[in-house]
Amino acid sequence: MVMRVTNQAQQANALRNLFRITEDQFLTNQRIASGKRILAPSDDPLGLRDVLSLRASISRSEQFNRNITFNRVFVNSADAALGSVSTSLVRAQELAVNSLNGLNTTATRQAAAEELDKIIDTVFEAANTKVQGRFLFSGTGITTEPFQQNAGALGALYSGDGNSLNLAVADGLTVPITKPGSEVFAVDLNPAVTTATNLSDLNGGAGVTLGSLSITDREGNNAVVNLGAATTVNDVITAINGAGINVTASINSAGNGLLLTDTSTTITQALTVTESGGGTVAQELGILGSRNGNLTGQDLNPVVTTATTIASLNGGSGLTLGSVEVTNGSLSGTVDLSGATTLNDVITTLNGAGLNLTASINSLGNGLDVVSSNANTTAVIADASGGNTASILGIGGNNVFLALDTLKQALERDDTEGIAASLDLLNASRDKVSEVRAEFAAVAQTLDQMDTLSKADVVTQTDQLSDIEDADFVEEAANLAALEIALQATLATTARVLQPTLLNFLN
Amino acid sequence: MTSNIFSILNTAKLGLQSQQLAIEVTGNNVANVQTEGYSRQTVTLEPNTPRNFNLGQIGTGVRATGITRSFDQFLFNQILSENQSLGNFTVRRDVFENLEVLLNETEGVSLNGELSNFFSALGDLANNPTGFSERSNVISAGASLTQTFNKLGNSLTEERLNLNRRIDDEVTQINSLITEIARLNEIIPNTDLTGFAANDLMDQRDQLVKELSQKLDITRISSGDGQMNLTLSDGTPLVLGDQTFTLSTQANSNNSGLLDISIQGAGGATVNITSAIQGGEVRGLLDMRDTEVAGALDRLDRLAASVVTEINRVHQEGIGLDGSTGNDFFTALSVTTAANSANSGTGSVTIANASPTTTSTDKFQLTFTSATDFDVVNLTTGQSVGSFTYAGTPINLGGGFAVTVTGAPTAGDVFDFSTAANAASGMSVSTALLADSQILAAGQNGTGDGDNALALAGLQTRGVFSGIGFSSGTGTATFDDFYSGILNNVGNGSRSAQTLAQQQEGIKLQLDARRESISGVSIDEEMINLIKFQQAFQASARMISIVDEMFDILQNQI
């Protein structure tokens, strides 16, 4: 039997056909207008996932790119500053060699000393270079001017810290774009905190304002710890450990502060340390705050004292001491410091070496000053061959400011032995500066490589993103044209099919 | 007996009447050509009872025995069953479309973009840790991220409430449909008693049943007396003759106060049929409300909770410009605890987030086995956390929840808790940080370095999810991956709903075409019928005039 096609069926069919085509037209038009193939997650759920991860990835690559572009100036400026220091050192060497020439007199050496004074100013300027308002060589203490004249002694005082600014240049890769001045121009002995460290030596020698602090362990037990009578770090640790709560104090793993370990079994809150009685003792001990776990205290930055052990220097890693070569006027000799266990040992060994040396701890408490006790000679301390003891102790060797200042004093004092001996220091300093410049060059190279890489990443990923996400205009335009033809044909046939009924033909 | 002239007149009269009736029915068909659900009617004609005479039988004309509608009840049953699938899939498609609009990454709100912006701002801060503009940039990017989470969280919650309102509306409509069907059931057999089928009323009732089948999974059982009984596919009666079993809604406090559906059972008691409904728009609405939208919201909440937990964890370890440490970046998460409405004990459970940087973002359920003992299950992973005994001190579980029991719970009492509930809509930057950008902890060694900002920025590529569980440090999926997963779910759900709805529409169109080919009105056909009946009418009329002439002959010419 022939299928009965009724009016409603015809109408419904015609409508559906028209709507199907116009819907396709609408979507195609939308894709063309937005330029995107994926307009909703359901258009391509897997494709959208790739789109999102590519977008995030592009944003990261752009971030790395921006990091490098905006911060390359730090590396470039450091290199420029070190270049100028290098030039200054060469000029100082020339002055020293010229001054040893037999034609020179006290007067010409004075003149050389005056020129050297200007050179030292230039080096200070280079070492205190600021980029974008941030000191280049003060570590992360970027608002602190790193170097000052060491009044009353030789060299410079370093007030910065021992950290570097790190720049993220790729996923999981950071490079240091600055170097602390203590690794370039002078030395910071950087002692670790030990139980024997006096509270008064903490915070760069500013000490701790004694008072009480309140500790609440994770179980909620609270104790007020009175540190009014504490004198050493050990006193603080003992007081906290004896407070009767589930908190144990110790020196932290970095060796630069305290660590509060919570041993609570029932946890109801965070381990919290607050001030008690309006003091600032918790903050000054670096343990103010709260943690859902153990509280690692901040860097307490202790100063050195004569009792400071050699093993606690260099952030607790200790220093391996050997011999130093001392020249002081006509006196000279090798001083063996390998037996020293404390700074006091170093100081007494130097002072008792019969070389007219006066050693002491510097005014910032982060280094040693060694001067000649004879006002007419200059004490020059160099590394023994193959060693680095003078350099790492910051009493000579490759310390730039010390080398320049020593030469200046030798020139002023007309001490030819001193002038000759400082040439060694200047050489060692130039080597040191060159070494650091090479490190910066390596960083600059990494930056260049990563810059190229991240730019290429952005390009390839954007390309890929476009492949997945963007509409194919040619295809869409072809679709649209095809749909238009289909629509016209459907409209034309619909008009013919729907119109006539038998009525049109009956009279 | 011989032929009777009056009998001829009578035959012609019957012919006239029958054709007139047929024309009237044809007229009715034409009038209803565009009426939805109308079934074409035809007059069944049959020869009138013949009378006997000496030569045998002779016909006495025609008689209309009834007006029948062209109706295929098997096709109708098929339409009903396909309709409930169509209703279900259409709702799913429409709601998924709404979700897609909400989560549209191409235009509009882009959580992916906001996350990228936030981490970029942290990257900039790492480069200049002391810069105030970098700091306020990070805070405003963080605030913008929280606003996006808030908006999405609120929109999804609103979507659930909308679905809830629609369920309420559907129940009202269903009730009015079944009441109307029952009323028609009452009338139809009475009309049938007259000997003629109540075609138009039956069409009306069929149309109502069809509407109802879009909403619920109904099964139709016709009883012999022309009444139509309707049940749910599990046998729960909806309409029995003229008796109706109306639906009602009640808030389910175990489901955020959203509505459950009950039916009036035998003896006046109401029975909860929320899970017994298997098809139709109502099932679609329930599924979308309680599974799909709720699932998307749950994932979004967990993402927000994880962002808060992880960012805060790293942020707390850093040092602000003012030297302070241990501060939160985002407002710490609190625990939402919900007691089951069926709990019989008087006990309550207080759960604190004792360790906001380590607590799990999963959903947990605590079930008492005695007044002091309880089991805890992680609902997200389905794994048991363990059995515990409360002895007066808080009990820790799930990485930092501190559970305290007060009062007297009884065995079987259930409490649900999680930190993630409403985490997206309630996410905010910590007020302390908003007040003072100095406490933004960019440094790790002191106040000048950007190492902590770097660590925070590094979280963008850090795996913090394993599967759907938040596991800081050991996971394999990043925040971005997790969010893509949400979109993927919605996208795939929407795609399959679209396909299914389209297929179902195709099936319905075919069935409708078949129904139309059986029951629909064709004007052409009716015109032909009209001509047919008109000619028959004319012929019968001609018969009368012939008989008239015959009378004339007999009276005047004899």
Image: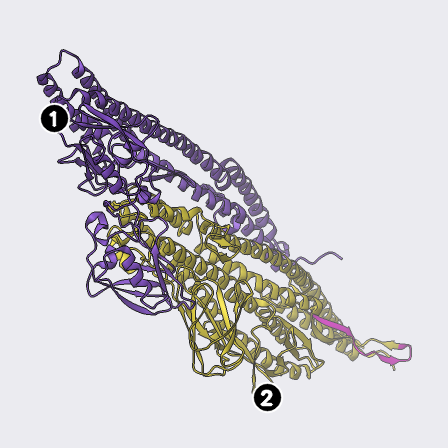
Chain colours: A purple, B yellow
Residue denoted by label 1: A376
Residue depicted at 64% across the width and 82% down the height: B241
Task: For mark 2, name the chain.
Answer: B
- Identity, as a three-letter code, of the amino acid under mark 2: Gly
In the depicted structure, whether residue A161 falls above or below residue B143: above
Q: Are marks 1 and 2 on the same chain?
A: no
Q: Which quarter of the figure is the N terminus of chain B placed in?
A: bottom right
Report whether B291 appears left or right of A234.
Answer: right
Say which quarter of the image contains residue B60.
Answer: bottom right
Q: Determine the residue located farthest toward the left in the rendered image.
A: A107
Q: Which quarter of the figure is the C terminus of chain B placed in?
A: bottom right
Q: Secondary structure at mark 1?
A: loop
Residue depicted at 19% across the width and 19% down the height: A96
Report whether B366 appears left or right of B523.
Answer: left
The Cα atoms of the two marked residues, 1 and 2, are separated by 120 Å
x, y (%) of residue A131?
23, 35
Residue denoted by label 2: B267
Regarding residue B1, the answer to whether it shows in the image is yes
Q: Secondary structure at mark 2?
A: helix
Magenta stretch contains residue B55: yes
x, y (%) of residue A189?
27, 40
- Identity, as a three-letter code, of the amino acid under mark 1: Asn
In the depicted structure, whether residue A345 falls above or below residue B275: above
Report whether B121 appears left or right of B236.
Answer: left
Magenta stretch contains residue B539: no
x, y (%) of residue B278?
61, 69
Q: Which residues are magenta?
A: B42-56
Residue depicted at 67% across the width and 68% down the height: B76
Q: Main secondary structure of the magenta part?
A: strand
Q: Nearer the viewer, residue B188 or B536?
A: B188
Report whether A44 appears left or right of A340.
Answer: right
Q: Are marks 1 and 2 in contact (CB under 8 Å)?
A: no
